[in-house]
Amino acid sequence: MLSSDTIAALSTPPGEGAIAVVRVSGPEALAIAAKIFRGPDSALKPRVATFGRIVDNGETIDQAVLTTFHAPVSYTGEDVVEIGCHGGVLVSARVLQTVLVAGARAAGPGEFTQRAFLNGKMDLTQAEAVMDLIRARTPLAAQAAAEQLAGRIGAEILAIREAILDVVAHVEAHIDFPDEDIDPDTGAALLGRIAATRDRIAKLLATANEGRILREGVRLAICGRPNAGKSSLLNRLAGFERAIVSPIPGTTRDTIEEALSLRGVPFRVIDTAGLRETPDAIEREGVRRAREAVTEADVVLRVVDATDPETMDDPSAADGEIIVVNKIDLADGIRDRIFANQNTHAVSCATGEGIDALVDSVSARVRAGTVAPRDSLAAVNARHQACLVRADQALADAGAKLGVAEPPEFVAIDLRAALDAAGEVVGIVDTEDILGRIFGSFCIGK
Ligand SMILES: Nc1nc2c(ncn2[C@@H]2O[C@H](COP(=O)(O)OP(=O)(O)OP(=O)(O)O)[C@@H](O)[C@H]2O)c(=O)[nH]1
Ligand SMILES: [Mg+2]
């Protein structure tokens, strides 16, 4: 399904740079290139970079390197032209303008990749991975996106669809031949296949939390009483003065969020208002938000002030929280009182002491808990998760009906729903291939 119009856009970020790339895709791409580019005759030869000039009404706008990719061997599957020009704001805009005047239309967001998907160059999970890779802020996130781009998730979804298709084919054969009920042996075999398929879906779904963390970061909330040093800790982790620090208790009122990479793991660190009872309405709202941040967090750091006897008497934390005893520079001998366990860390935000060890332990904990060692880092996103949950539910329904020998028509409806839901993950939803499979794998003359 090739598009009828030709799109163009600046593919590099707008701003000053050594080079900028203007990309053109569609049926007119080569004709447009011929119109605006002056260079050797070989200029439009596929996949050869050619040096020349971009001209507009006889005026030379820039020197440029032109590369063409002829359909279908290109990113979008269409004729594609890439113009490497000088990376000035004005000059790259003029080159793009020349392309537009020559007959292209300005591309919408993601339109090249959308065309790549529509032309079968990649499935939906790969198209999504393109953006994940571009947006990745940590090496782990980039690696996961690269594996998804290589088709890791798409391949597994296709395998799951194949498995469901096999079951559908068997069940639907019984619809076409109503005399033959599904015999118990066949029924049990189909139930076994459904269970095996649900296991595969469960394995993918188990990567959802990790997927969220890789794409959005681990939500790490810093909480504790006023003045404990929460904002100082955020600043230490960020490496710059992100939040206001002051000796006045109640300095931080709203939650403050900062995206950070700690030991290669992406984090969203949230500094919160000090937890206390207060008559001040604004601060009360801050405390409410702080509690909410703690509830939603993947990891909670509870900061206590080593010089404050009240908090130090009870440095107990809720399950899973990490206690950070701060200001140890002021509290001689405090280390001896801190029960050395994995969940308690003595630090000084003033001197930096203990911060490295704290970061090590937090990032190690996240890796151990979520980034489980396995072959692939690729992890499903929220959309995949929603589709897979639907597919799984539909398979469960189909299995239940098969188990009590309901008519195959009803079982088939659920199976088809599962097939559609799985197909949605990669962007295919079809019925044609189910028919093909029935008649292809069964002998109709029998
Ligand atoms: N000596 C010493 N002072 C610290 C340390 N950490 C923070 N402080 C000081 O403690 C005071 C409070 O620090 P903040 O980081 O603003 O504390 P907070 O927990 O964010 O306070 P609220 O926002 O009011 O809840 C400031 O005067 C800091 O300079 C530390 O490790 N050692
Ligand atoms: Mg603060």
Image (cartoon, rainbow, N blue to C red):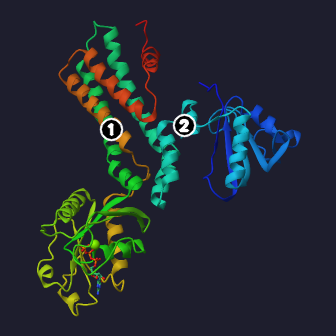
Residue 89, picture quadrant: bottom right
Q: CA distance from mark 2 to mark 1?
A: 21 Å
- Side of 443 where 13 appears, left or right: right
Q: Position of residue 257 (x, y in %)?
A: 35, 62
Q: Could you tell me if residue 251 is visible in this image?
A: yes
Q: What residue is drawn where x is 72% and y is 51%?
A: 91
> In the depicted view, which residue is nearer to us: 164 or 61?
61
Q: Could you tell me if residue 80 is visible in this image?
A: no
Residue type at mark 1 is Ala
Residue type at mark 2 is Met
Count of residue discs: 2
> In the depicted view, which residue is nearer to us: 58 or 200?
58
- Side of 201 where 23 appears, left or right: right
Q: What residue is drawn where x is 34% and y is 48%?
A: 208
Q: Quadrant of the N terminus?
A: top right
- Side of 421 where 284 appears, left or right: left
Name the residue tied to disc 1: 386
Q: Quadrant of ligand 2?
A: bottom left
Badge 2: few (under 14), some or many (20 or more) residues near its Cα, within 10 Å? many
> In the depicted view, which residue is nearer to us: 58 or 398?
58
Q: What residue is drawn where x is 20% and y is 27%?
A: 400
Name the residue tied to disc 2: 122
Residue 279, picture quadrant: bottom left
- Side of 317 where 408 appears, left or right: right
Vertical order, 196 against 20 (above or below) = above
Q: Position of residue 172 (x, y in %)?
A: 34, 16
Return the mark for residue 121: none
